Amino acid sequence: MTTLQLGQTDLTVSRLSYGCMRIVGTWNPGEITSARAESAREALIAAYEAGYTLFDHADIYCSGACEEHHGRLLKDSPELRRQTIIATKCGIRFGNTPNPGDPGRYDFSKDWILKSCEGSLKRLGVETIDLYQLHRPDVLMNPEEVAEAFTALHRSGKVRWFGVSNFLPTHVSLLQKSLPFPIVSNQVEVSLKRLDCFVDGTLDQCLADGIVPLSWSPLGGGSLGEGQAAPADDAKRLALLEAMDKVAIAHAVSRTVIALAWLMKHPSGIIPIVGSANPANIADSAKADGLELSREEWYTLYVAARGERMP
């Protein structure tokens, strides 16, 4: 797979990222069987074999189990660490933790960021996280407190670069003012099913400031992937899938590949995060690397996704 420099960093990453949220097949650690553990290992190995080097995690994915299983693979196969760029996230706290009755919430306090990072480092079995991201905007965020946490992690060598996730441009600008180093990524939901980032300034800011957009759910939660159908009464989605299939046939690839290539054409340099745990799908998705859609094909899909012609 093609590699590139990740924005303003010194990190070299694959053109697509592999998302590890689904590798163990559950959100409940108690449901992880030996079969699920083996499936996680097979999915990760398939990603390496297909050329993915940027791996996306979060501390909440199966309560840290996804990080743990990746860490086990890296321990068993230390040669893989040299070709692995690890991105993970913090800041989401589930309800009833640590105390019964505690609400689900977001936490960008210095203590929580530092504690969360230590947990991810331990589970992954690494000394340094390459890209550490705040998961969802904390309404109580104190930018100076976040800057203190980030600076401490950077100076200690525990984190190389920092990013955010699901941040609006105003959130990014607010935080950046307090940081002594750049925010290098913004992981956002963008796809042919979710077009907000094209018009709310998110991708404009990424392009202007050299921030790399990482696309989570690039297949619209799987609804844009191969084999998916639209309800008969959903004319907009039917038209979109028909348009995608037409372009896919023209390029002799799957609908999945078209959905990913469509994102990758944007000049902001969107890196789609492929989240399938199926080895065949992981390999197929990699075919989006190098597929160049024409401007006409891109707009055909954009108009279909909008459900109305351009103004």
Image: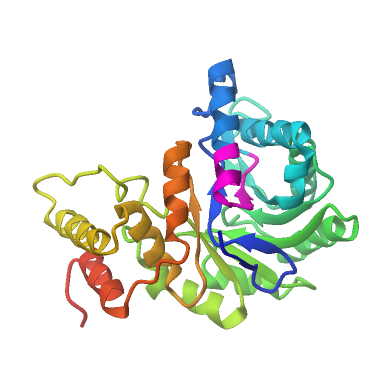
Q: Determine whether, in the image, residue 183 is placed left or right of residue 245.
A: right
Q: Identify which residue is drawn at 50% across, 27% down.
A: 26
Up-down relation of residue 124 to residue 168 (above or below): above
Q: Is residue 103 visible to the viewer in this orientation of the structure? A: no
Farthest residue, direction left: 233
User: Considering the image in quadrants, where does the N terminus appear?
Assistant: bottom right
Counting every numbered tag in the picture gives 0
Can the viewer see residue 213 in this picture? yes
> Percent from the top left, x then y, of residue 177?
71, 76
Q: Position of residue 89 (x, y in %)?
A: 65, 49
In the displayed structure, 256 sits above or below 263; it is above
Q: Position of residue 75 (x, y in %)?
A: 78, 33
Quarter of the image for residue 173 reads bottom right
Q: Residue at x 68, y 69 (%)?
A: 183
Q: Is residue 5 left or right of residue 305?
A: right
Residues in magenta, as a range: 45-59
Q: Is residue 44 magenta?
A: no
Q: Quadrant of the C terminus?
A: bottom left
Q: Residue at x 61, y 77 (%)?
A: 210
